[in-house]
Image (cartoon, grey):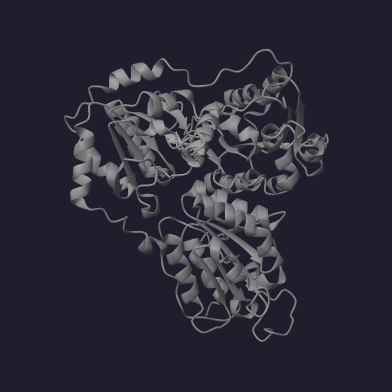
Amino acid sequence: MPNVSRVILDSLGDEGISAFFMVPGKMINAYMSNYRQADEQGHPRIAPVIAAAEGGAAAMADGYARASEKFGVAIALDGPGVANAVGGLVNAQADRSPVVLLSGHIPRGFDARDALQDVTPTGLDMAALLAPVTSSSLQVRSAGHPIRYWNTTLRSLAACPTRPVYLSYAADVLFAETDESAVSMRALTSSHTSCDQADLDRVITRINESASVAVLVGSHANKRDVRKLLTRLSESHDILVGSTIDAKGAFTESHPNSVGVFGYSANLRAVDLFARNPPETVLLLGCRPSQWNTNAWDPGLSGARNIIEVTSSIEDIGNFVPGSETLLCDELTFLRHWETTLAGTAFAGNAAVRERAETVPLHEPVPDDVDALHPARAVRCLNKWLKDRVCIADSGNHRSFATHYWTTHIDAGFHSSTTMGVMGWAFGAAIGISYARQEGCLVITGDGCALMNGMEVQTAVRYRRNIIFAIFDNSSYGATYMNNKNNLPELSVLPAHDWVKFAESVGAEGFRVRTLDELDTVAQKIKDDDGVYVLHIMVDRDAGTPAQSYRENLTSFAKSRSGSDAQ
């Protein structure tokens, strides 16, 4: 009879999870001793990846979840290990990423005995601590029906919108034998969000009667089947498509019908299309109502005659833009039904919308009168040679440049931590993404991020990942420096570090570049290589980020809320 940890690991294998991410510990020995059960070909069904730290493991699970469109799994010793992973859970919660955090804690009988790392209610009570950042937070102190807790966890994981979950077993319970079976996620997610047929027909009729239509796609719609169908509809009916920042790449930006990102660091063409010269109907497909997605609540979003919001998340209904008509419906269900009604429909005004859009440049201009390497030029150079890689942008000024100037050429080719913006997240996330997609990755990060979580480069080397880490070094916490130049220098300026030597110390190959020509040469040299590379790119600290429209709208919104503009 299998034990509890074996049932859970088998369940993960049945769900198609190929790897879990962890830091070892005594209380999770059951997971560590059970993962090797092989398939018919003699290979372990699920592979462990040992991270440098639990925060990195959580980021890896987050990246795996986003790229696989399944869920990611982190395993950690409860207490200090789980505490180290909390930042990763907070980040996943904010971005609605389905991460499972499994752990083991003190055996039964040690409660209320001042035991080392007691996380039960007689100690730290970790389940209560994690409840606000998970949809399910459970500790199991009984061997009676232990898999029921796992099944409850899976049901929470399948809920919409998705959230992280936490499940911790007493160490001895993990070794307890059980005859219980795990529920299948396929059974839990087989039904889509319910949709009122009359409302669906009414909304689609309104869209089809429009002279022109454009689509703004958000993170809820960033699913493989939705992306494929949306591309087909865009091509068959000449529909322009933009994305919110958390869905960048959901519509491939090298496609001629793409207008790029709308929101923070927006592309100029997207701002013009959705907020300045909109078509008759703007369809908001699976969007989230955060300030980053809406370009700081841009009032121009209300300019279209019809603003139709379709989302599978009831939490977001009616919150994206004032005056929108809302429909609670699974995004794929909506597109499939819409496609069946489009025969003979011609959006006659779409050609004029396209002509207007094409007169607007995609990017903000890059100044020529600087001696240092401008981050925008560095991003464009990397994009030129590494466009077939998945780009993972970390948090900081470099993310603004990556969001604006990187053009995705592959399906779902961009990932970033958007809502919380955890610095250094991309180091771990890229490893998880590389396991989910088995494709080359490029990380665009900064020197401040590298100081926080750069040790996961060693994990990438250890597991022979195909990842290039491009560290944009401006010798500062760039966002802090730009947001308040009155700070004392030591509050934002960082000392010079040699990231090439760091790379070499953990087994990666490093290159330092100071000019665009040097970067061009190095990127071309390594573009087809596998393995781990670190590019130490010295960039201009004073380069302004391409987020002018966001800053203007944020200032305007703040004034309207305070009443300071009512003069």
> Residue 429: where, in percent of width, then height?
60, 47
Rendered position, 304 above or below 34: above
Q: Residue at x 81, y 38 (%)?
A: 490
Tell me if 185 is positioned left or right of 340 in this view. Answer: right
Q: Nearer the viewer, residue 202 or 239?
A: 202
Tell me if 209 is positioned left or right of 335 in this view. Answer: left
Using the rendered image of the protein, determine whether residue 75 is visible from the camera's viewpoint: yes
Which residue is most to the left?
344
Q: Residue at x 50, y 62 (%)?
A: 13
Tell me if 20 is positioned left or right of 235 in this view. Answer: right
> Residue 564: where, in percent of width, then height?
52, 36
Which residue is most to the front?
567
> Residue 177: where, in percent of width, then height?
55, 81
The total of numbered circles placed on residues is 0
Q: Nearer the viewer, residue 300 or 14?
A: 300
> Residue 470: where, in percent of width, then height?
68, 33
